[in-house]
Image: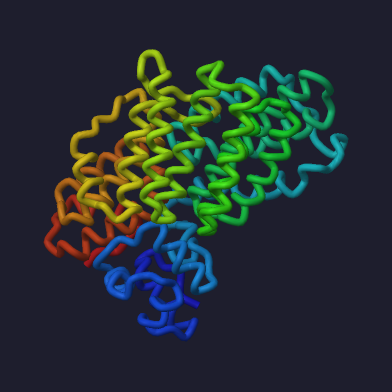
Amino acid sequence: MPSNHVEESVGARIASYRKLAGYTQRELAEHSHLSLGNIRKVERGERLPTHGFLTTAARTLAVSVEELTGQPYRGQQRSDERAHAPIAAIRTVVRAFDLPPEWRPTPRPLGEIANDVEEATRHRAAARYTRLGQALPELLEELTAVVHTLDGDRKRRAAQMLASSYYMAHCLAYRLGYADLAGQLDDRQRWAADLSGDPLTVALAQWSRAGGFQAAHEYDAGLRLLARARAQLAEETGTSSPAAVTLLGSLRLREATLASRARDDQATEHHLSEAARLAEQIPDKNDRVHYHLTFGPVNVAVHGIAAQVELKNPEEAAKRASVLRLPSSLPRTRRGHHHIDAARAFLAVGDRDKALTALQDARQVAPQQTRYHPMAREAVRLLAERYRHAGQEVRTLATWMGQAVA
């Protein structure tokens, strides 16, 4: 089994698992329908793999994407340990979700818990993983107890907050690289969402669930799930509220993401166009956040750039990224993710300076998200490998991520 050292590149891991499976590079290409030239360049560390490449390679080699990327990145710093420390407690709460309420500590009043849910929501939007993780185990424990003891509207309100907390825990587990836990949290989120009776909370749970199909390279199933969720939400709420527009638009954007990873240009463009049409309904044209999801013209543009990267149109992605300006009001998670995608596009077209700037911007707005993002880490590694005399700025980034640079 390949080692889990931070120094090992994604390409090296793919090569190791390929050899364990008994494949030559040509045989892997034949079985996976990936380009032989692309496999060679990724394994040599000369090219960043797309998400689609990683999921296809993982599926062919019968391993997880996390095994190929080396997640979770535990690191050697105390800050890494603090970020990962709450995972064990979250696992405990997830296992005990259906145990009777008398087995749990007495929860605080629902209003006090609600204040802490709002604070955790701010931590998630800012990608403050350590502080989010510290808050979640107690929130999940208390809200589970409340859901089991209350009735009527108060139970539904508590269930909505519990579904929201499960969503935040899923985000944390996924970003830190705990795919198994993220899947369990998806299940718990849907359970709580159904108890809430709120169609928007249910839609968020389905949006989150589609991420599991996305990670498993089961794009058709994910697209069917999203289309059904969108139709159900439109039937129940229409576009009667700003929150409904945000959820409907976000479902469209996730459809665009899945379609781009399936390499379906036409479907990708269709979903992006429909999302843009929904964004036109926002009176001031400023992106808004509802139910943790961001939607508006800027986020549509951000998804369009990411889609071009996945569709292997890096020139178009780089062109758009060069002119797009993100407002400071956009959540840090969205800005950080965009800067990482922009860096991937700039690397693909050989623009070293813009790639480095994009990665530095990502670190500045969302440091923990950037530190634990596999594409950001691989982009820094590729910068260091491709540009041997890249300078102190690249070495600083690599050291910060816990990577060895020659």
- In the picture, measured across the screen, residue 124 lies left or right of residue 277, that is right
Dividing the picture into quadrants, the one containing residue 209 is top right
- Residue 404 image position (x, y, % from top left): 29, 64
Q: Quadrant of the C terminus?
A: bottom left
Q: Nearer the viewer, residue 30 or 9?
A: 30
The residue depicted at 54 percent of the width and 16 percent of the height is: 241
The residue depicted at 82 percent of the width and 20 percent of the height is: 152
Dividing the picture into quadrants, the one containing residue 405 is bottom left
Q: Residue furthest left?
A: 389
- Residue 333 image position (x, y, % from top left): 41, 36
- Residue 328 image position (x, y, % from top left): 31, 25
- In the picture, measured across the screen, residue 244 lies left or right of residue 403, that is right
The residue depicted at 63 percent of the width and 45 percent of the height is: 186
The residue depicted at 53 percent of the width and 69 percent of the height is: 63
- Residue 106 image position (x, y, % from top left): 80, 29
- In the picture, measured across the screen, residue 205 lies left or right of residue 274, that is right
